[in-house]
Amino acid sequence: MNVAFKTKLSSLYGNTSKGTKHLGEEHLLIATKVTVENERKRSRAEQLDRIRNVVVTGDDSRRINLLLETMLAVNNNLPFRIGEYEESELLADFTLGDAFRVTINNHVVTRLIAEVYSSARTSACDYIDRSGVVGVPTFTVVCDMLASKTQKSTKYIGLRLYFVDSEWKFQSILLGTRHYEHM
């Protein structure tokens, strides 16, 4: 008997095979694991209500902060990096009232740049005075982008002070750095 068998391979689309898609769309069959995972997910409002119910009084902001920071560390396994995580947004919802939320526009950005410049200039002058360097009539403050030596994708923005001292030596001092996350 010479019977030719034709095997049909199901090609994959993303992580879901054609067979799984067919069962879900035509027969409305869904794996129990997917159902359980979808039921476990909470909306942002449900999460806020859950935390509000745990805290006895609404004024207990220290307890709310502790709960949210713990959730941030446990859920993301990144205790040292606070970014746009869900817990950070929840924390902002709890701690910032509508009166403190700022609309970012040209006027606000211009004012903040002037404040940052003034602060950097003051800290540079204070650093030169404290270090005992004499004869520095002018200096330059520059924002530099720095890359981490261990993780090349991690970027930092640094405030660097450049000047020539009284002995005609070029000086470069890093005043401070902040983690920079490109949006």
Image (tube, rainbow, N blue to C red):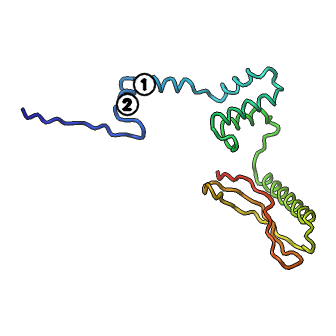
> At 13% across and 36% down in the image, what residue appears?
4
Residue 151 numbered mark, or none? none
Asked if disc 1 and disc 2 are in contact, CB closer than 8 Å, the reply is no
Callout 1 amino acid: Ile
Q: Does 143 sit left or right of 85 as displayed? A: right
Q: Examine the image and state in which quarter residue 132 appears.
A: bottom right
Q: Quadrant of the N terminus?
A: top left
> At 80% across and 65% down in the image, what residue appears?
173
Lower position in the chain sequence, tag 1 or tag 2: 2
Q: Position of residue 154 (x, y in %)?
A: 64, 54
Mark 2: which secondary structure? helix
Mark 1: which secondary structure? loop
Categorize mark 1 by other alpha carbons within 10 Å: few (<14), some (14-19), many (20+): few
Against 3, residue 175 (above or below) is: below
Q: Position of residue 158 (x, y in %)?
A: 75, 59
Q: Examine the image and state in which quarter residue 106 appears.
A: bottom right
Q: Position of residue 57 (x, y in %)?
A: 82, 22
Callout 2 amino acid: Thr
Count the numbered circles shown: 2
Q: Position of residue 139 (x, y in %)?
A: 85, 71
| Of the pair 27 and 3, the residue shown nearer to us | 3
> At 67% across and 42% down in the image, what residue appears?
84
Disc 1/disc 2 C-alpha distance (Å): 8 Å
The residue singled out by tag 1 in the image is 30
Which residue is outermost to the bottom?
A: 168
The residue singled out by tag 2 in the image is 20
Categorize mark 2 by other alpha carbons within 10 Å: few (<14), some (14-19), many (20+): some
